[in-house]
Image: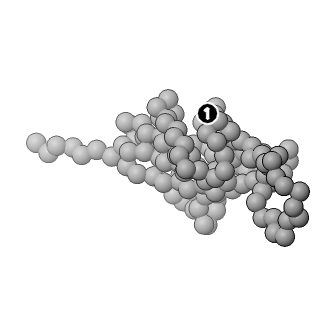
Amino acid sequence: MGKAMTRSLFPFGPVWDEFFGTGLNVLQDKATSLRPAIDVEETDDALKITVEVPGLEKDAVDVSLEDGQLTISGEKKESTERDEANFHVRERRYGRFQRTLTLPSSVDTTKADARYENGLLVITFPKSDEVKPRRLEVK
């Protein structure tokens, strides 16, 4: 595997991250042949990460959390039952993939939920109660 590099999820890169203080970065490995697309959505209550992994069974995807980092990995294997026909176009990719995201400290990783359906892996991290917006009653 090659050397991992950090890439910002936002269009203006590190400047955006520093200004808005998201604390969420994506580590990627250039040596991998697959790079599933990721959406990151934040609400007042949670951080939701959606990963496109079409053509994979649920058991072919591994999700792990360690030291504030979320790692999603798996392998898309080429079918061994193909005919001996000649391919005219071959755009589908096969192989191993791995995506690593550094999670912000505002999420509660102990209450994470991961669901897989129709080629989409959705991982939800609720925000810690300390960082959720709240209203104070005026007396």
Q: Residue furthest top?
A: 110
Q: Which residue is mark 1?
A: 65
Name the residue at 68% across, 39% down: 60
Relative to 56, is 96 on the left or the right?
Answer: right
Q: Relative to residue 102, is residue 15 depicted above or below?
A: below
Q: Nearer the viewer, residue 78 or 122?
A: 78
Residue 74 appears in the figure: yes
- From the top left corner, tell me how far across and down residue 100 is, in percent: 67, 44
* Callout 1: SS: strand
Which residue is drawn at the image coordinates 61% and 33% (left, top)? 65
Q: Residue sitting at 48 percent across and 54 percent down?
A: 41
Residue 18 location in percent, x, y? 58, 56
Say how many tags the image has.
1
Q: Nearer the viewer, residue 85 or 134?
A: 85
Q: For this view, does 139 lie left or right of residue 49?
A: left
Residue 71 at x, y percent in the picture: 66, 40
> What amino acid type is highlighted by mark number 1?
Leu
How far across and down, in percent of the image, does residue 102 sit? 62, 44
Q: In what quadrant of the picture does the N terminus appear?
A: top right
| Residue at horizontal 73 percent and vertical 50 percent from the top | 28
Q: Is residue 71 visible from the viewing direction of this image?
A: no
Q: Label 1 crowding class (10 Å Cα cut-off): few <14, some 14-19, many 20+?
A: some
Residue 89, compared with residue 17, is above or below; it is below
